[in-house]
Amino acid sequence: MKIHEYQAKELFRNYAIPVPGSQIAFTADEAVKAAEDLKGPKYVVKAQIHAGGRGKGGGVKVVDSLDGVREAAGQILGMQLVTHQTGPEGKKVKSVLIEEASNIASEKYLSIILDRATADMVIMVSPDGGMDIEEVAEKTPERLLKVHVHPTVGIQPFQIRKVVKFLGIPKEGMKEAGKLIANLYKLNMELDCSMVEINPLVVTAENRVFALDGKINFDSNALYRHKDILAFRDTDEEDPLELEASKYDLNYIKLDGNVGCLVNGAGLAMGTMDIIKFYGAEPANFLDVGGGADAESIENAFRILLSDKNVEAVLINIFGGILRCDLLAEGVVAAAKKLDMKIPLVIRMKGTNVEKGKEILAGSDLEFAVAETMKEAAEKVANLVKQPVA
Ligand code: ADP
Ligand code: MG
């Protein structure tokens, strides 16, 4: 789960990570009121959306008066902000963070990410902050340092010293930077984050160290033990189909292709997506209905798949274990009728009661293409979609 910058900064404050004074506002009037409570005369008005690159897209404006705050807030609130992370349609801005402007001497990069390959935390830093870290990694990899921290050992003082030194923090700011890094690591562990990022981490002309931006992603599987963080969820920022799927405990992720996939088990779902691509088509989604799926979850899954306008054909690939193939077949027939399905469907099933399942499909007056193997199923469905999307 993602949260907004202003929420991340609230958490930073709880962990004594220095941030400039700021307040959230939903209207231009509120923005001016917020600024009046802050230290002026320079303020920054920042669009709150779940995407980075706001500065380049016109969603971050530095102003030097209260009138400037009103004007900038008026411009940014309600705008459809397009950044390299939003896609071409952009995101509608509902709120702005009004922040005291920092007297920036230099911008650095700092993040802590869960590294699945090494099963530990990796602290990533660069003295070249404020810009795309992907670009730094590609063009000047020597300007990026990664320090692995084992979760049972925790972050060690020598690692903090190494990171602070690499960042090129001036002597006067070293202590504050060291504390900030230790506190950020604590936050990351205690709140079950999958990533925390401060870009830019700034050193001011007065040698203070501040988190000027804040991005936090949480491990959704751990959110049950962080009710206060769950309250930060902003469903307006989520994909509507993914949101709908989450209500029924379906693991659904929307993709850009045109073959809808309904599969049980994450491994089988990934294998199915791979083989669809192998035969020249593109999956429209990842969908794992889970091992214990019943007729009702099949219907919900079906409905979500079909409401994606890009879907031109559907492939159902089910291994009948807990979910018996005859029950699946009944569920599919019922759902297809109820939803008045118009697009072609390919079904491949294996496992418990598969013969009975096939009889049910054959006995219905709906048209299905049945496949024996994954290869056959993928080939069939790839031929059904007119043009694979690029
Ligand atoms: P994004 O990463 O989405 O573009 P940031 O919060 O990183 O948004 O802001 C973009 C840039 O705006 C920063 O790199 C910094 O140069 C400037 N900026 C942001 N907040 C402040 C602030 N409080 N004071 C001065 N400059 C700021
Ligand atoms: Mg940033």
Image (spheres, grey):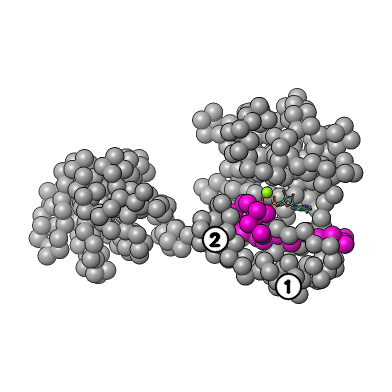
Residue that mark 2 sits on = 90
Q: Residue at x 75, y 26 (%)?
A: 162
Camera sees residue 193: yes
The local crowd at label 2, few if under 14, some if 14 to 19, many if 20 or more residues have their Cα within 10 Å, is some
- The amino acid at mark 1 is Ala
Residue 288 in view here:
no
Circle 1: is it few (<14), some (14-19), or many (20+) Cα within 10 Å? many
Residue under the image location 78 percent in, 67 percent down? 69
Tag 1, which secondary structure? helix
Q: Is residue 206 magenta?
A: no
Name the residue type under label 2: Gly
Q: Nearer the viewer, residue 307 or 158?
A: 307
Dominant secondary structure, magenta: loop
Residue under circle 1?
A: 28
Q: Are the residues tagged 1 and 2 within 8 Å (C-beta)? A: no
Counting every numbered tag in the picture gives: 2
The picture places residue 52, in percent across and down from the top left corner, at 62, 51
Find the magenta span and give its range.
38-59
Q: Residue at x 54, y 61 (%)?
A: 90
Judged by depth in the image, the label closer to the viewer, 1 or 2, is 2
Residue 327, above or below 203: below
Residue extending farthest to the bottom is: 29
Foreground residue, 167 or 181? 167
14 in relation to 69, above or below: above
Secondary structure of the residue carrying tag 2 is loop
Q: Residue at 29% x, 39% y: name it.
A: 278
Instruction: Classify 239 as above or below 275.
Output: below
Q: Indicate the position of residue 189 as horizontal and vertical percent values.
A: 64, 40
Mark 1 / mark 2, whichever is N-terminal: 1
State how far apart marks 1 and 2 are (Cα).
21 Å
Query: In the rendering, at what x and y percent does residue 192 appear?
Result: 60, 44
